[in-house]
Image (spheres, helix red, strand yellow):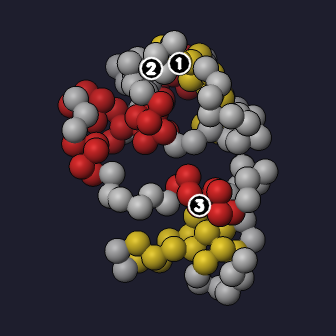
Amino acid sequence: MDRHPGRGLVRHRVNVEIKGGKQSIGNDYSRDLDLPTFAKRYIVATDPTAKLSSYPPRIRRAIERSKLMPGMTREQVLMSVGYPVSSENPTLDAKTWRYWLSSFAEFQVVFDDHWQLKQVITDQQTSNLVEMD
C-alpha cells in the first residue's frame, strides 16, 4: 500500500489525479472494504458522460441533480447517489439498499424483480431532498 502523501492509497483515503487536478476520496463509511476495492467503486476508467447522455432526458436530469425516480436502473441509482454504505449493505444483489443522507436522514431504495427502482422509503423531509418530482 502506497503511503506517500499526495498520491496513491493512504489510510482511509485514495489520492488520484483527474484531468490534471488532485483529488482525495475519503472512505469514511465503508471501512470494511479494503482501499483497492473501495477505489474501484468510485474511480471509473471511462468518462461516464457518453453513457449519461444516452439516458432519457428526465433520468439524466435526476442523475445530474443527485435525485432518484421510479424506473431507474441500479447503475443509474449508483450514478445519481453513489454506493450505499457497505457495512449496512454487504451485497449489491439485495433488493433494498440503505443510505444515509445525514445522521438523521436515512432512506432505502427498493428495486423490483427487473432491478429497477420501485420505491424510496423515507420520511417526507428526506424524500424532498432525494426524490425527483
Which amino acid is tagged 2?
Gln
Residue 43, horizontal then vertical, whole percent: 49, 60
Q: Residue furthest bottom?
A: 4
Which amino acid is tagged 1?
Phe
Q: Bin the neighbour count of mark 1 within 10 Å (Cα to Cα): few under 14, some 14-19, many 20 and up.
A: many
Name the residue carrying label 2: 116
Q: Is residue 125 above or below residue 88?
A: above
User: Which quarter of the figure is the N terminus placed in?
Assistant: bottom right
Residue nearest the observer in this picture, 100 or 89: 89
Q: Residue at x 22, y 38 (%)?
A: 54
Q: Bin the neighbour count of mark 2 within 10 Å (Cα to Cα): few under 14, some 14-19, many 20 and up.
A: many
For the residues labelled 2 and 1, say whether their Cβ atoms are less than 8 Å apart. Answer: yes
Q: Residue at x 56, y 57 (%)?
A: 40
Q: Is residue 73 above or below residue 40?
A: above
For the residues labelled 3 and 1, say whether their Cβ atoms are less than 8 Å apart. Answer: no
Q: Is residue 121 above or below residue 19?
A: above
Q: Is residue 94 left or right of residue 79?
A: right
Residue 62, horizontal then vertical, whole percent: 34, 32
Of the two numbered discs 2 and 1 on the same chain, state the one appearing first in sequence: 1
Q: Is residue 30 left or right of residue 22?
A: right
Residue 78, horizontal then vertical, whole percent: 48, 39
Residue 90 occupies quadrant: top right
Name the residue carrying label 1: 111
